[in-house]
Image: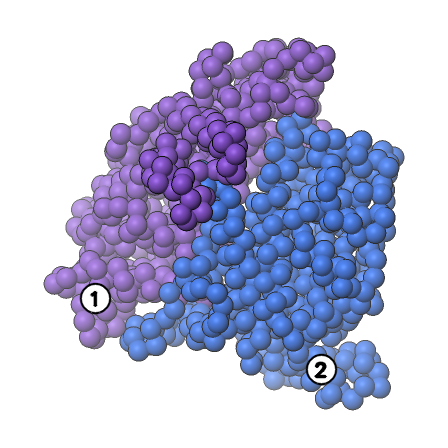
Chain colours: A purple, B blue
Amino acid sequence: MALADQDLKAAIAVTRFGLGAKPGEIVEAKHDPQGYLSGQIRRSGADQPSGQAMTSAQRMAEFRDYRRERRELRVEKASDGRPATPAGVAADGDMATKSDVRDPVKVVGNMLRQDISSDFTARTQLGASTDTAFRERWALFWANHFTVSATKAITGTVVGPFEDEAIRPNVFGRFQDLLGAAESHPAMLTYLDQIQSVGPDSQFAINTRRGGARGIGSGGFLPAVQRTVGLNENLAREIMELHTVGVNGGYTQADVTEFARAMTGLSIGNERDGGFGVAIFRPQAHEPGDRTIMGVRYDQQGKEQANAILIDLASKPQTARFICTKIARHFVADDPPPSLVDRLERAWTSSNGDLARVAETLVTAPEAWDPRPRKFKTPYEFIVSSFRAAGGQPRNFQQFGPILTALGQKPFSAPSPKGWPEDAQSWAAPDAIVKRMQFAQAFSTATLRDRDPKILAAEALGERLSPETAMAIARAETRPEGFALLLMSPEFQRR
Amino acid sequence: MNAITPSRRSLLATAAGFGLSVQLLAVPAMAAETALNAKKVIVVICRGGMDGLSVAPPVGDSDYHGLRGQLTLNDALPLDGAFALHPQLASVHAMAKAGEARIVPAIATPDRARSHFEAQDVLETGAAGVYSTTSGWLNRAVETLAIRRKVDAISIGPTAPLLLRGKVQTASWSPGRGVDAEARLPALLQDLYRDDPLLGPALARGLATETMAKDATAGLDGQPATMIKTDAMGVAAPQASARAAAQQGREAAHTLGASLAGFMREPGGPTVAAISLDGFDSHANQAGLLTARLAYLDAVLDGVRQGLGPEWKNTVVVVATEFGRTARANGTGGTDHGTGSTALLLGGALKPGGIVGDWPTLKQSALFENRDVAPTLDMRSLFKGVLADHMGVDRAQLDKVVFPDSAAVKPVLGLV
């Protein structure tokens, strides 16, 4: 591996570890490329997107009101003798049409959608404008590691607050604290179905079987009386498989079920016990008794039991190995150098999962500075870096939301708890390249005006700009065509 | 990187030719290849672990009601005394009644970890275990076939499924604005990408597919660009008008299926296709979730059938998922990760028949680990049967290349 010179290292620092260069950024990184990155690591965590974001609990309450009103409206319409349809589906010319304009349900529904897109817009604006883009990338890595997704309606309005409340403050702290914050957040509890999971031998289950108990654990979102109560093992499995030890981490189906039993009681509150959308522990829904997981007996009772298990999972060597491999894959190569993974793993283990130490190790590891750009940008990285290259930031959701969806990375909507894929094969399908080209064309036409694409190319890629691309841009017929060539160049598409 | 030395290539050709002559016996090779040229196969992957007992409820099984409780489907569409189809699978049901659809009620990949991601990898790579190969079995099947005849493959959606990734550059398409044929940028980029092994072939292929798309999607209701949202499967935001959204979703799904069919009907168009649908992971409130997802699936399949028109008789569609779900309902109105599930076989090329594979029953003693439907058929057997009989893939290649080290996994023959 050839050692990169200082100019090239500055370009690598800004493009590989950050979100692409803003004009002037590579020059700024030049005097000390590694220090430029190390200086972005801080105990207090990642930056918060600006805006008047509501808390998760407020969002949950808003969502509950929306569901409730919708239900009531349906009942009302049914008793009117009109079809019991949700708002907004009234046929043209129907009497209901006029009133639907101010239909409170529709209004709130739009407000919720608006919440989701404004959260995502604030996050994208932060990405496009930040001076500390490595810090932001580090936060995005962890947000994807602990994926929650708007593919589930109840979770949708709290994906943004989840990142702000559980992820961003903890990304340079201990992994165990980040893990605890993520798994007990209302977004995770709803996304992976923990809110309804009840111990089969808990007091609550016994009462329900006698026919005495009312609905619980749903925060008012679900039918008041459920016909069955019992375990849901979704969160337990994904914590082990995706968040800690990994699928080859040495656990069995029995361990998953035991862990699910240990976590019963963890849910979100309702009107009677703690407030809507607030993470709580209900002792009466907790499965009594000791649990044995991966050969360790847990005799704690109540919520301490799940906490003890989480702490143990966080400190397992399998967890260090699994996550350090992911970090190396995210930042350096789809097939990362084993020596880099070893290096990160040693930093993790010797610091007991201190994520600031792991980040520092990453940016000082020689393997991470290989001049070959081996990562193909995800759609989000491509779009954000395009805005940065143009020296601007998006004003509204329409400027980047639809294209992200068309490229397969719909805002806040990862297709599964595994999160967005990392590899080039996933993102470089023929259709996706054509759509990136269409975006580059439209974006260049809309943003470039009278600026010189040759200068923007030098600012965006520095020493990484190839003679072929520089030549193609120099020969472009129009300025926007030159800028589109830059955005679509092999070196801009990679980092 | 794809360079095959002349000697290696002729060796492969010889081997393939030998396999073909054995397989087709007295049929003249040229005529046989011509007939095979028209054969089409479509693989639909339903991600998230589709609940087989909801797709094709075993209504005749005396343990079905007891295990399923509130998840019992009382209004399922009957197939025979033993099985029925989910009420949302009305088009599939009509095909079954016409002898053009069959169910495979207890099928699984060789993976038993109950992990979505590991099981999807095994389903799509066609390997015996996870992490042993990085390309998809359908790509390798195309690679094998391409030695003898021109075979193209396409995936529908913004990202290419692992199933179709590999050495052969395949097409991919999702609805969009189309490419301005007059613009200079595509040509300039092709020049800039001439030494780029990833972007060069991908852009060339994407542009060719866009050209084909103009004809392939012509005449479909509405403009695909506005008709089809790539997010139609997702419940992105709380919908103020759930029913209207569902209707839009069904129409979009139908158009998506018809678009895929449009490509396959084009002269020189793809004869192999893959499409994947998300969102089948039904841990809670399964009834509502599956109603929406299966309606979507049904509309895609109906769109494919209608769109293919006269080519439907040359087509086999396989619908598969990474694993089934627990036989018992869980505590939250859903089911957790399980093992055996139901696959669907559809197409005008199918021979009519009953269920494919054996039904293990839902007796407690018959359940896998006292929990899941016990698989009686390896997913690879089904795929191999379709590829061998319908597409004419050589048996030796199936055992070694398409599904590595799988000689012991016998194909299900006689499906077409």
**The one of A79 and B173 positioned closer to us in this rendering:** A79
In the picture shown, does residue A183 fall above or below B412? above
Q: Position of residue A204 (x, y in %)?
A: 64, 13
Residue at image point 37% right, 23% down:
A58
**The one of B406 and B315 positioned closer to us in this rendering:** B315
Report the residue that reaches farthest toward the left: A450
**The one of A294 and A257 positioned closer to us in this rendering:** A257
Q: Which residue is mark 2?
A: B35
* Location of residue A382 by image quarter: bottom left
* Location of residue B44 by image quarter: bottom right
Q: Are marks 1 and 2 on the same chain?
A: no
Task: Please indicate whether residue A30 sits to the left or right of residue B329 in the image.
Answer: left
Task: Please indicate whether residue A141 sits to the left or right of residue B392 in the image.
Answer: left
The amino acid type of the residue labelled 2 equals Ala
Q: Position of residue A292 (x, y in %)?
A: 69, 20
Is residue A336 visible in this depiction of the protein?
A: no
User: For numbered disc 1, what is the local secondary structure?
Assistant: helix
Report the quarter where the C terminus of chain B lies.
bottom right
* Location of residue B69 by image quarter: top right
Label 1 Cα neighbours within 10 Å, binned few <14 / some 14-19 / many ≥20: many
Label 2 Cα neighbours within 10 Å, binned few <14 / some 14-19 / many ≥20: few
Q: Which residue is mark 1?
A: A480
Residue at image point 74% right, 84% down:
B32
Task: Please indicate whether residue A192 sits to the left or right of residue A442 in the image.
Answer: right
Task: Please indicate whether residue B90 sits to the left or right of residue B416 in the image.
Answer: left
Chain ID for label 1? A
User: For numbered disc 2, what is the local secondary structure?
Assistant: helix
Q: Position of residue A185 (x, y in %)?
A: 46, 25
The amino acid type of the residue labelled 1 equals Pro
Residue at image point 59% right, 63% down:
B303
